[in-house]
Amino acid sequence: MQPKTFYTIRFNDCDPMGHLNNARYIDYMLNAREDHLKQAYQITLAEYHKQGIAWVVRRHDIQYLRPAFYNEIVCIESRLIELGESHVLVEMLMFDEKQTTLKAIMWTNFTSIDVKTGRRKEHPAAFMDFAATIKVTDIDIPAGLTERIKGLTMNA
């Protein structure tokens, strides 16, 4: 079971039509991932920062499938789907409250950096060992988001 969190869509995050602003989907999903790291794995980004490592976004791939509306409760799941020496690929899914309708999917590629130099840095061995235990292996990344969406929505 992957970590999940429920959020209420806030008024100030919506457009005049009451739809969640496209850019705000990213904020909700990244905030959820940070919450998931803390709640499910007892990882805080501040602790890694103290150790001299941080992650920066290299790329977001996002597809919006259904609108999220003002005051709606949504469920966001996240999972690690790829682990490299200096990068991780995280999948984040936004569903309706009942978790029956996929609203958006985002794959974010994070690169680890040295906080002092700002340059790419390989993950520490302890992180690699831990991350290998939570990495999901049944997602066909080369097939891309479109195929992933098909697989997720066929079961719904």
Image (tube, rainbow, N blue to C red):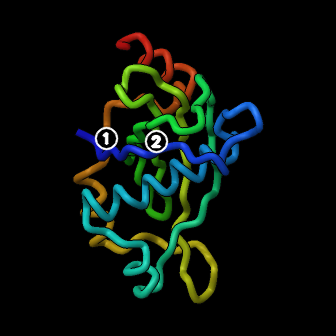
- The residue located at (62%, 86%) in the rendering is 117
Give x and y (percent) for residue 20.
64, 38
- The residue located at (42%, 47%) in the rendering is 82
State yes or no: discs 2 and 1 in contact (Cβ < 8 Å).
yes
Q: Is residue 135 left or right of residue 148?
A: left
Give x and y (percent) for residue 131.
30, 58
Graded by Cα atoms within 10 Å as few (under 14), some (14 to 19) or many (20 or more), the crowding at tag 2 reads many
Quadrant (top left/top right/bottom left/bottom right) for the N terminus: top left
Camera-nearest residue between 38 and 21:
21
Q: Is residue 136 left or right of residue 104?
A: left
Q: Please name which of the two marks, 2 or 1, marks the residue nearer to the observer.
A: 2
Answer above or below: position of 19 versus 78.
Answer: above
Q: Secondary structure at mark 2?
A: strand
Q: Is residue 108 left or right of residue 13?
A: left
Please name the amino acid that badge 1 sits on: Val
Answer above or below: position of 109 versus 43.
Answer: above
The residue indicated by pointer 2 is: 91
- Name, please, the residue furthest toward the top: 154
Camera-nearest residue between 5 and 153:
5
Camera-nearest residue between 147 and 4:
4
- Name, please, the residue furthest toward the right: 16
Q: Secondary structure at mark 1?
A: loop
Quadrant (top left/top right/bottom left/bottom right) for the C terminus: top left
Labels 2 and 1: the sequence-earlier one: 2
Answer above or below: position of 145 versus 85.
Answer: above
- The residue located at (62%, 37%) in the rendering is 62
Give x and y (percent) for residue 125.
31, 72
Q: Which mark is residue 136?
A: 1
Please name the amino acid that badge 2 sits on: Glu
Q: Which mark is residue 117?
A: none
